[in-house]
Structures are given as C-alpha cells and as structure tokens.
Image (spheres, grey):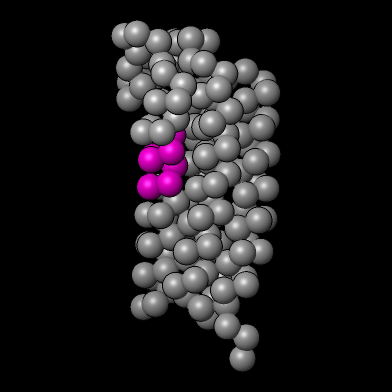
Amino acid sequence: MRNVLATIAGFIVAALVVYIFESLIGQNLFPLPEGSEPTNMEWLKNNMNKIPVGSKVFVVTVHFIGIVAGMFVAGFISKTSMIPAYIVGMLMIAATFFNIVVLPKELWFTLSDGALALVGFLFGTKLASKQILKE
C-alpha cells in the first residue's frame, strides 16, 4: 500500500511542479502575446512561433525538474522500492514525449526537451535510490 501511495504522491508532485512553474511562474516571467490561448491546443499548434524563447527554455527546464521532484518524492515515501519512482519517471517522460509529438516545435526545443527528460529520469533515479533504506 505504501508503494501505491508513493507512486500517486510522486506523480501529483511532478504534475504540480510542472503546472506551477510552467503556467503560473513561467507565463509571468515570459508573458505570452496578447490574445493567446495557452489551454487551447489548436491555438498552440498554430502559434508556437509567437511564444517567447525564454518561455520555451523555461518549459524544457521545468519538465526536467518535475521528473526529478516526482521521482524523489516517490522514493522518499516508498523507502523500500524503486518501482514507484520508475513509474512516476516513465509517466512524466511519456507526457513530455506526447507534448513533443502533439505540438510542432523547433528542432532545438524538441531535442532539448526529450534529452532533458531522459537526463531528469537518470538524475531522479539517483536521488530516489538514496531514499531507499538499505537492510
């Protein structure tokens, strides 16, 4: 039961980190153009070129941080198994790659988002494994 809770909590933390940083902080630091609709996928598909570069860099960074944070929390709560951390990491990588496929982006954005998501998984694995109690 503890591992189920660890997985759910880790995923919620990862999603909240991405949402808070991407939507609330990122859009205040790098405002979107007037009349933009960031929750409308069609608007995003047709207007990716209007989104500030700083906002895109922030998104890539936040995807990395979200994966690491979620995996850490999953490992911290579980204490006995890496499986919850792996599940959280894989779900977040899947979400990142879904985002890459669904929204057309510049090559640098696509490559850096995918690469940093994978690096985040590796870094998250190291942090989560340090939370597992050795018997």
Q: Nearer the viewer, residue 50 or 42?
A: 50
Q: Horizontally, is 82 left or right of 21 in the view?
A: right
Residue segment shown in magenta = 16-22
Placement of the N terminus among the 4 image quadrants: bottom left
Residue shown at 58% from the left, 67% from the top? 128
Residue 17 belongs to the span the image colors magenta: yes
Residue shown at 62% from the left, 86% from the top? 134
Placement of the C terminus among the 4 image quadrants: bottom right
**Residue extending farthest front:** 29
Percent position of residue 52, x then y: 51, 16
Where, by quadrant of the figure, is residue 24 drawn?
top left
Camera sees residue 129: yes
Residue shown at 57% from the left, 77% from the top? 132
Magenta stretch, overall SS: helix
Percent position of residue 13, x then y: 40, 54
Q: Is residue 42 above or below residue 120?
A: above
Q: Horizontally, is 55 left or right of 27 in the view?
A: right
Residue shown at 39% from the left, 77% from the top? 2
Camera sees residue 90: no
Q: Horizontally, is 74 left or right of 2 in the view?
A: right
Residue 21 belongs to the span the image colors magenta: yes
Percent position of residue 64, x then y: 58, 44
Percent position of residue 18, x then y: 44, 42
Q: Is residue 34 above or below residue 88?
A: above
